[in-house]
Amino acid sequence: MRLPRYRFGEFELDPASRELLRRGERIALPPKSFECLVHLIANRDRAVGRDELISAVWGRVEVSDTVVAQTLLRARKALDDTGDRQSLIRTVPRFGYRWVAAVQEVVPSDDKVPGESATAATAVALPDNEAMPAGNEMPAAAVRARAPWPWLVLLLVAVVAAGWAVYRYWPGARPGSAPQSHGNVALVLPVVVTPSEGEDDWVRLGAMDYLASRLRRSGLKVLPSDQAMHLSAQVGDSKPITADGLQKLQSISAAHWIVAPEALHDRQGWRMRLNLYEAGRQPQIIEARGATALTAAAAVSDSWLRRLGLDGKAREATPSPMVERVQQVDAELLAGQIANARRLIEGAPAKERDEPALRVREGQIEYRAGRIEEAAATFQKVLDGQRAMTDGVRAKALMGQGAVEIRRGNFPAAESRYTEALTVLESRASDVDDPALLGNAYNGRGVARVQQGKMDAAVQDMGRARIAMQRSGNLIEAATVGSNLGQIETRRGHYSQALQEFDRAIAVFERFDVRDYLAVTLMSKAATQLQLVQPADAAASIQRADALAKALEDPELAMRIATVRTYVLLANGRIRGAEQSIAGLRALGMDETDQGLQELMLRLQLARNARTDAGVLARRHPNAADRVQGSLALTAVQAALRNGDAGTARYWLSRSPTQGATTSDGATTSWDVARALVAQSEGRAEHALQMARQARAVAERTGSPDDRVRTGLLQARLLLDRGQPDAAAAVLGDLDAFAASDYRVAWTTLALYRALGDPGMAANALDRVQALRGERDIAVEPVL
């Protein structure tokens, strides 16, 4: 069934087609502004907090007040609601925004399910808030239909000390497969709190996280809180949760139990209710009272655990004030409210201020605020303190130090800190029973090892991290590891395995609608496909990534994707598109001295056969202290030689790494090809051919398919220049598998058949060149 359209005044907004109309005329509106309107209108019965709006629209917490205000300003301008009018969108001071105009919902008749009315819905009814009896439990048969509480839609990222220094991705089963329910997996959703405002706001996430931790310690596998928030966003704010929504939650999470908590604060204290949805059974309700929200949460969770026969580990009967303060801090961190979390810590009584559990969170806050040295000092204070601490707190402090060292670029020290954390977590006497913490430690050490070139050890760490995440039921972190492994496997030359890792992660990101990480993984896949000489496939991947990046409005991500997109466009001969993409990179703020931008501009000018412009770019030398990229040097050498500028070509060779310097295989191949081209230009044809053979041998052993193509084409072209087409045919025959996908191979194969005087084969080769040329001039030899 389609989403309803909303009519207000002379406007109509259609969420399904993503159109805003004014008297039937479509109004252009940025994606985020449109999504803000949809969320505000859908929740027009109440004020929407700034954090909720960020979570629902941006899907992450690192969004400034300025970005939110500008996004809403664009929406207001489109609706002619600017200035002091606020007749449609009203600002709620120190809270957020509210839609205040009258709205008519319109459900298109052609969207109706046959035999169903336009307003029909299948739902599992939640109990009336005021009908809760005084007892601890309530059978599902006693539940009656009611007008449900407003459902708070949340999509927030959990704060983990070890995770901040690692680019996080997420997990999955086989691409396209739906997970199966597991008997001991529970999903605890955010708590619906009544009243839903004021100083009790923290209960929404704090009590959710506390319930999850308490259940986890008693033997249940409970999905992480950040993942629960992503999942809750999948079902929107339907009231009550529909049967379809419950099925979707179970399908995505593989959870056997869906726990939807509700909390009511009244004069007698707190009432906490667990609405329990178990796969294949009728819903159940368990309820308990307590003086505080966490006391009620403890009582209701223990009641359910007793019903399940899970006594588990010893649990505190009544959460202490310290436990409640820590949970409040964690709730603020989950919501991205760093300032609030800091105030909670600073306002703690003196006897609590130096508690390790609180101090380690202070270090996390400093790290997230970018105060790296302050974070390092705070983590050290935790470890040097005299107060007893749990193994989990000690491990978090060590992992925090590891994250700090990664930010400092001190990767050996980072590896050491993560190793210490793993020693604590893997100790037989350890009191830590959360595999996710172990997985984060392995993932952090794996990242530190990648940066040191310890690929085999890094892969082992990532493998252990993935197993730990899967054991904890943390699909998000497992996919993070999988996407990291995809990039590592690309660097190791295991391309088919890399694509498999990317595809698994992509399937999960799509399932969870995690758009920024989906975009990054698609970008990584496109870059790998270029190395596999699959430019058309790379174009399909980067096109999807680009569409996602535009909707996310993330300048840094947009710049990274635009860079890969430009390489892909050039590989496919889309010259005008590449020119626009480079202009976009400049608009995004890419520095003109950036070596990647210089290489792209050189390749663009060479593809346009603008030799003079390319020659000018080749004479623009990098800073003397900078390490020159081999791919840039090779492109600049080709530009210089096409202008007869041997001096500039030799200059670029002079910037090659010193003997024994560590370079990637691709970089080594680029320098070898550049040297051979310069040797040929100097009349040392035999020496050039010898270097080409050596470069090809290296590429065959350790290079990528693209390295094989470049070195093979170099050797074939040198042989053709020497009048040896038969010898060139032997080389090109080895590259024939790429002739149908790579323009460079197709073009050189055409030159071969013309040299052999074979018009029939030349005609066939010309057809392939025409199919792959794009906007390139086939009279111009393509660059290597």
Image: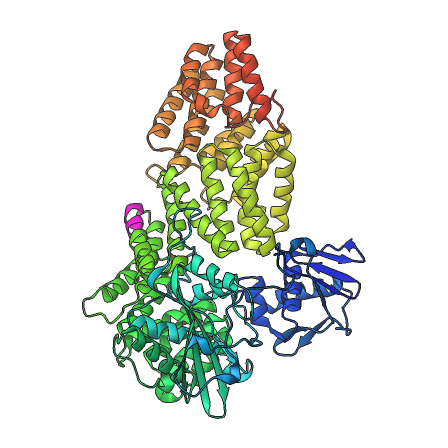
Q: Is residue 695 above or below residue 478?
A: above
Residue 458 painted magenta: yes
Residue 528 painted magenta: no
Out of 334 and 651, give the one closest to the viewer: 334
Residue 716 quadrant? top left
What residue is at 38 percent from the left and 25 percent from the top?
Answer: 696
Residue 160 quadrant? bottom left
Judge left or right: residue 159 versus residue 148. Answer: left
- The boundaries of the magenta stretch are 455-460
The percent position of residue 364, horizontal first and vertical second, equals 41, 70
What residue is at 40 percent from the left and 23 percent from the top?
Answer: 692
Instruction: Please state, as top left, top right, bottom left or bottom right, where the N terminus lies in the image.
Output: bottom right
The percent position of residue 352, horizontal first and vertical second, equals 36, 85
Out of 415 and 390, give the one closest to the viewer: 390
Outermost left residue = 428
What residue is at 31 percent from the left and 48 percent from the top?
Answer: 459
